[in-house]
Amino acid sequence: MNNSWYDAAVPLPVIDVDRSSPIPLYFQVAEQLERAITEGRLAPGDRIDNEITMAQQLGLSRPTMRQAIQVLVDKGLVVRKRGVGTQVVHGQIRRSIELTSLYDDLVRAGSVPETTVLSFERSTIDAGSEELVQLPDGTEVWRFERLRTVGGKPLALLYNVVPVSVADLSSASLDKSGLYQALRSAGVHLRVADQQISARGATTREARLLEERKGAPLLTMRRTAYDDEGRIVEFGSHVYRPELYSFQMTLVDR
Amino acid sequence: MNNSWYDAAVPLPVIDVDRSSPIPLYFQVAEQLERAITEGRLAPGDRIDNEITMAQQLGLSRPTMRQAIQVLVDKGLVVRKRGVGTQVVHGQIRRSIELTSLYDDLVRAGSVPETTVLSFERSTIDAGSEELVQLPDGTEVWRFERLRTVGGKPLALLYNVVPVSVADLSSASLDKSGLYQALRSAGVHLRVADQQISARGATTREARLLEERKGAPLLTMRRTAYDDEGRIVEFGSHVYRPELYSFQMTLVDR
DNA sequence: GTCAAGCATTTGTCCGGACATACTTACGTA
DNA sequence: TACGTAAGTATGTCCGGACAAATGCTTGAC
C-alpha cells in the first residue's frame, strides 16, 4: 500500500446524483464514496480528486461537495490537507460513536440476539432509589431487567429505568426487539447519551445468569440517554461477558 | 429545569469576535458558546437565538454562524430542530471521542500523572511477533512498557509498539510526557485510531505492578493509531484499574 | 370546542464567489 | 548540485443569497 500523498488521484468511482430524490445531494455523494471505500474500490492511500473538479464532474457546488467529504472526514475515512488534497486513510468502519443499543449493534453485526425479560415493573422514584437514576422523587418509571443471549450463550445482563412519561413500555415489546427500537416506535427521538465503561467482578447472581464463575471479570457500562428536548429518557446499567463482547470504536482527531 | 422547546431564547452570553486573531471566527464563537454551556451560563433547556439573529449580532455570515453551532452539535452540547430552533441539551462534556492519550486526559482532568518506563527497546518485527502488531516482517520498532500512576497510586500498565521510522523515541522523552505528545513533537500528525475496550483478570505480574490481587478485574484497551497519511504510527495494549479509571464518552445520534 | 388552513419562524440544503493558507513543484541562480 | 523563490495546487475560511422543509402559532369556519 503506497501511502504517499503524492500519488496521482485515482479515477473517481462512478457516482450518481439523483436530484429527484428526497435524500440530500451531499448525503448521496457521501454514501457512495463511503461504499467505494468500504468495498475497497477506494483503498487506503488513494487520493480523491480535488473538491472543485469533483464538484464540476457531479454538477454540484463546491460547498455541497465539501459537505459530502466532511461526512467522510467525521467518520475517519478520509483526511484532508490544505494544498495537498484528500486521501483515503481507512477501509474499515468500526462501531462508531453513534448512539445505538446493544441490540442494534448485534443485528448489524449479523447476530440474532435473543432477549429474556427477567423482571418488569412500574414503580415510583423516592429518596431511597439507587443513585443510577437522577429523577425527581415521585417520578413514575418502568424498571426492567433483561438477559441477552447470542447463539444460545448468555452475553449481557441489562438493567434499565425509563420514565413512564417517556413511553408506554411493556414486557412483550421488550421481548421482541431492543429498548431503543421500542422507544423510537413510541416517537422518542434519542439524541445524546453519556456513557461510562468500566469493569468489575461478577456477583453471585450475575455469575449464575451469565454462566460465569463468581468474581469473573465483567465489562460494565452505565448510560444516561436524552431525547432531542433534553429530557432524560433512559438510564441503563449493563454487564457483559468480555469473551463475547467488547466495545469497538474509531477515534478521530479534531 | 424547563425542557420545553417553546421557552423564549435566553439572552445571548457576551461573545467577542476578534477578527485580528488567527483563530477562525467560527471557532472563536463555538468556543465561547461551549464555555457558556460548561460554566452553566447556558443551561440545558435554554434555547439559543436563531442563526440569523446571532449572526447579525456578531457581525458574521449565516454559514459561519452555522459552522460554529455545528461544532457544538458534533459535541452533543446542543440540538437543532428545523422550524423550532437550537437548544442546549447538555451542560457536561465527558471525554469525547477525540483521539487523545491517557496522559492528555489525566492532565485535562487536573491530575498529575507520573510515568515509570519499565522497559524500552528497539527490535525487529518477525513472524513470531505478537499479533497486536500488524507490520511487515523486518520493520524496526520501539517496544516499551510504562507504569502510569496518579497520586502515588498505580493506575495503568501501558505496552506500546511504534515503528522507528515514525519517530525517534527515547526512554527519557517518555518519562517526561505522554507518548502522543512525544509523537507530536516529532512532527507526527495523529488522525484516526481504532480502539477496542474489554475486560479480563490480572496476571500475576500485572497484579504486582498495579497493586491488585491476581485475577482482579482489569479494564483493557487495545488501539491502532494512524497518521494523516494512513500510516500506522502506534499499537497500544493497556490495562487499567477500574477503581481508578473508566472510559467516559458522550454518544451523539447522527 | 375542534379542526383546518394560512402564516410565521427557524433550520436544512444548495449555490456562486472571493480570499487566505499550507503544501508541492519547478525554475533560476550561486 | 544545492538552495531559495515563485508559481501552482488544493483545502480552509468567510460571505451573501435563495429556496425547501419542518414545526408551531394564530385565525376563522363549522
Image (cartoon, coloured by chain):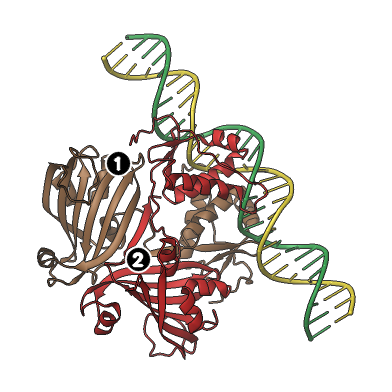
Chain colours: A brown, B red, C yellow, D green
As helix, strand or loop, the secondary structure at mark 1 comes to loop
Judge from the rendering whether residue B170 lies leftward or rightward of residue A157; answer left or right: right
Q: Position of residue D12 (x, y in %)?
A: 61, 55
Location of residue A50 with respect to B212 vertically, above or below: above
Location of residue B117 with respect to B68 vertically, above or below: below
Q: How many marks?
A: 2
Does the residue at mark 1 contact the one at mark 2 (Cβ under 8 Å)? no
Report the chain holding disc 2: A
Residue type at mark 2 is Gln
In the image, which disc is placed on residue A248? 2
Which of pointers 1 and 2 lies earlier in the amino acid sequence?
1
Residue occupying image coordinates x 52% and y 82%: B169
Residue type at mark 1 is Val
Residue occupying image coordinates x 46% and y 41%: A22
Q: Position of residue B212 (x, y in %)?
A: 24, 76
Q: Position of residue A205 (x, y in %)?
A: 10, 63
Q: Which residue is mark 1?
A: A188
